[in-house]
Image (tube, helix red, strand yellow):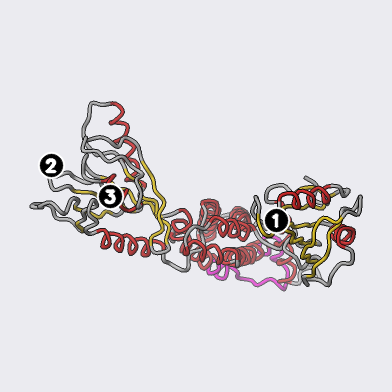
Amino acid sequence: MRSDDTIFAIASGHGRAAVCLIRISGPESRSILERMAGRVPDPRRAVVRTLSDPSTGEPLDQALILWMPGPQSFTGEDQAELHIHGGLATRAAVLRALGSFENCRPAEAGEFTRRAFLNGRMDLSQVEGLADIIDAETEAQRRQAMLQLGGRLGHAAEEWRETILRILALLEASLDFSDEGDVPEDLEADILRMIDEVQGAIGRALANRSGERLREGLTVVLAGPPNAGKSTLLNALAQRDVAIVSPIPGTTRDVIEVHCDLGGLPVIIADTAGMRESADLIEQEGVSRALARTQDADLVLWLVPPEGEESTPPSVRRLLKVGTKADLKRSRHDCDLLVAAATGQGLPELIRRLEAEAASMMGQGDAVITRERHRKALERAHGSLVRARAMLAGRGPLELAAEEVRLAARAIGEITGRVDVEDVLDRLFSSFCIGK
C-alpha cells in the first residue's frame, strides 16, 4: 500500500441505485478530474459535468462533481467526488476509466480514513467514533458515537497527556538542571499535586463503564429452573420465535441471544438452560454455560414459576425476580414483577423496568471510555502514576519515578495515536529557558 498513490472507491451502497458516489484522494486528483470532466470547478462547489473516458474521449455519464483541495478535506489530501448515476454499467465504466490512470488504484478497506489519521485530520479515538457511527443500531449509540467523533475522548486524553508531560518536564529539570537559576528549588509539592489531579481524573474515567456498556449492549440473562418460561419470555420480548418452547424440561441446552432496542438503548437478552441437577452430560454443559453467563451479566432476570420447588438464584451483580405464568394462581413466591408471556400480561411493566435499568447503567453522559483498548491504556497509565507518586512520596529514585511518568504519557498517547518523546524536550526548554 503506497501512501503517494491516488486512490478511488465507491462511498455509497452497492447494487443498482439512483446515485452512486465515487471518492478520489491523492496527488493526481486534480489531473484526473481535469481529464475526465474538463475544467475543475471552484473548491467545494458542486457543478454538473459530462465525464469522458480519458483514452477514447467517449462520454460516460453526466455527473455532479466536487473538488476539495487539501489540506481542507476529509483525508487532508487533494480530493474529488463524482456523483454519477447508479446503474451497474455506468458505475463499472467510470471505475474502469479511473483505474486506467497511472499511479491511481482502488482504495483498500479503510484507506481513506487511514490517510485522514496519518495527515492529522483525525486521531485514533475519532477514527473509532466514525466506525461506531457506521455500526450504531440505537439512538443512544449514535449519540455516543457522535461525541467520540467530535473528539470527547481525544480531548480528554490530550489534556491528561499534557499534564503528564509537564510533570515529566519538571522531573527531568530536577534531575538534569538543578543548578540552573530558572528551575524552581522545590518542585515536589507541585509535582505531587499534578499527579493527584490527573490520576484522579483517569480513575474516575475508569470507574465509569457506561460507555462500554452502551457501545456493546447491556447483557440481560434469563435464568431459572426448567420450565420457568424463559424461552416463552424471550420470544415475547423479541417479538418473534427465536427459541423453541416446549413443556419438556431441559429443552434449552445452549445460550440463545437476541439484540433488542429498549428505549433507544442496546440490550442483549440471553436465554439459558434451566438450572437443575442432571445426569445428562449435554444438559450439564448447558447448566454450566448458564451459570457462567449469569456471572458475566449486567442484569439477571430470575424467573420463578408458580409450581415446583423454591429455587435459589445465584449470586450475581444485579438480579430481579420475575414471577412467570401470572395468569395462573400464585401462592408463595415473592417477586419484583409478575408476567404471563403467553398472554402479554405484565410485559409492558417488565419492558419499562428493563428500560429504566438500562438507562441507570448506561445513561451517564460523562463517560469517555468506549472500548477495551481505551481501558487497557488508561489502566497502564494509572498504574504508572500510582507507582511514580509512591516513589516521590517515599523519596525514592527520581530516575525511576520519571520513567513511570514517561510510561504513563506513552500509554495515554496510544489512545489518540500521538506518541512522541520529543514533546518532553519541547516543554522542558520552553518552560525553563535552559541554556539561553
Quarter of image, res 84: bottom right
Q: Does the magenta stretch include residue 189?
A: yes
- Foreground: 257 or 19? 19
The correct choice, above or below, for 67 with respect to 94 in the image is below
Q: What residue type is labelled 1?
A: Gly
- Out of 37 and 116, give the one closest to the viewer: 37
Checking the image for residue 308, the label placed there is: 2
Label 3 element class: helix
Rendering coords of residue 258 (x, y %): 39, 48
Asked if the residue at tag 1 contacts the one at tag 3, i.e. Cβ–Cβ closer than 8 Å, the answer is no
Residue 405 visible within the image: no
Q: Residue 86 carries which label?
A: 1
**Disc marking residue 233:** 3
Determine whether, in the image, residue 326 is placed left or right of residue 362: left
Q: Which residue occupies 65% across, 72% down?
A: 184
For the residues carrying marks 1 and 2, which lies nearer the camera in this image?
1
Helix, strand or loop at label 1? It is: strand
Q: Where is residue 311 in the image (x, y as percent from the top left)?
A: 17, 44
